Image (cartoon, grey):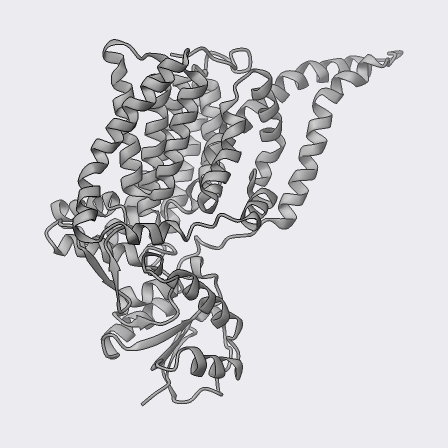
Amino acid sequence: MLSDPFEDLFPRRVSLGVWVLFGLLVLGAICHRLYLIYGAPLPLNDGGLFWVHTQAIYEGGLRLPAVVPYNGLEIPGSYPPLSFLLAASIAWVTGVDTLEIVRYLPFALHVGFIALLAPLMRAYGVAWSGVLLALVVLILTQRSYEWLIMGGGLTRSAGAMAAMAAMAAAVFTAWAMSGPRAGWAWAGGASLGLAILSHLEWGLTAVLLCVMVVATRAPRWSVALRGCTMGAVAALLVLSPWLWWLSQNTGFAPLGDAMATSQHSTAQYYRALRAHLFPTFLTYFAIVGGYECLRRRAFLWPLLPFLILALTPRHFETAVTIPNSVLAAVGFAALWRVAVPLLGDISGRLRPRARWTSEDFRRPAVFLVPMGFAAGMTIFGTVSDWKSDALEPMRAGDYQAMLWARDNLPPGAAIVALNPDHWAADEVSEWLPAIADLQSLGTVQGREWLPGGAFHTATNLSGQLKANSNCPELDAFLSLEFPEAEYLFVSADLGERVFDCLPGAQVFADQGTRIWQLKQ
């Protein structure tokens, strides 16, 4: 085990009462997440394309498909396949419907992601009291589970779990690189390969985490180089069957098209730093924790948020919860150590005839100055933060309308789904072609794997559709951009908005959801 840079901050012993409280907190968090999942008619938010991919593997006898039919398109089967294979294999062995697997498997994998923070910090030598505090922070941070337990979390949670396993193994690699202990390097590399096989961006994050851990904790550069080399070889061995399959079936062009959609731009960096550098309730402690880590030469944790942002800005908000939970725990412990004697001094000064000196104001400045700065950051972050509704379940009317469309509309009919949410949180547009077997003209998902800038074209059209969702602008927009549309699906999220300007007739209405037939 490595030496603990925070040895004087965290008590070495944890009382039984603390363990009980921690267990109750974990139980409450699990129940809350399961309540969100169980109460929804479909897997939360996204995941329609992933369910179709999983179903294709299941129906193909657990063989990878070269092409996945979705939304009237032939999507190359180039997506990292590990989580799809895992879900299809569970369905194959247990007989459980693949839709239910896609609903609950992301939750199970995200539990592993959170739990792996414990061996990671213990490998760093952190006492159990510090580990539990960081786990509490991670559990309570919404972004640590928001995009992992939804349907699309099937790949994200698997990648996150494998990335954490790779990082923990990398710590042991830096600690011992001789004899049989060198097997940690192979284990870390294998976990790294599994992360890439699950989710490309989590795979890149895993590479960054492993390199940073070995570089900052290895006793010598030769040890770091040897550990990284062994890990890279192990990762390539794990990846080689999939890479060979890609070369023989889809080629590597779709993979390049998908990676090109990642948002590396100055505006993206600014938005992330403005609103998501630290979750607002962590800001007080995380900034102080960063300073404390730098003072103790524990450079890994304060550097990781910025390196993750530079490497993978699109999924930065989720990945950054790993170092932020550690920073917040360290910051809390550091402030507590200063605050306890300070409060004792103040209580003594409140006695009759006590005299105040300049020394009484110097010690408060040790934490009042960073706390004041953190408070300003918190207020700014609260005002500018984007409030996500990604975990809200699909409305019952929308789901019933999809089932009606599946049973009553011609397969493959062209339909436009109208929903006010941003395309990334528009579950109606993604699930409609998966459930009803229709061609949803405004759906973005899946097009990142197509050539010719299809993804950016689709996102622009989706934004324009949502901006022109009132009559008569909607009629003009549909005639111009989607002249082939036969039906219009109006989500219940749009309320009682009137569309009397549209041609055709309303053919379905239930619980606020409506479907128009635009063409006879």
Q: Is 346 left or right of 321, judged from the image as shown?
A: right
Res. 112 in view: no
Residue at image coords 28%, 19%: 184
Task: Work out which quarter of the rendered image holds the C terminus and state it.
Answer: bottom left
Q: Is residue 19 above or below residue 76?
A: above
In percent of width and height, residue 156 lies at 35, 44
In percent of width and height, residue 183 lies at 25, 18
Residue at image coords 49%, 87%: 501
In percent of width and height, residue 345 lies at 75, 13
Instruction: Please tell me how many numbered marks the rendered image carries.
Output: 0
In this view of the protein, which residue sits in the foreground, 19 or 460?
460
Q: In the orientation shown, which residue stands out farthest toward the left?
A: 61
Q: Is 261 left or right of 99, judged from the image as shown?
A: right
Task: Work out which quarter of the rendered image holds the N terminus and state it.
Answer: top left
Q: Is residue 439 above or below residue 303?
A: below
Q: Is residue 397 above or below residue 170?
A: below
Q: Is 87 left or right of 112, judged from the image as shown?
A: left
In percent of width and height, residue 250 lies at 21, 53
Residue at image coords 32%, 67%: 432
In this view of the protein, which residue sits in the foreground, 472 or 258?
258
Q: Is 326 left or right of 108, judged from the image as shown?
A: right
Would you identify the image quadrant in which residue 214 lies? top left
Q: Is residue 495 above or below residue 77?
A: below
Res. 125 in view: yes
Would you identify the image quadrant in which residue 159 lies? top left
In this view of the protein, which residue sits in the foreground, 239 or 166?
239
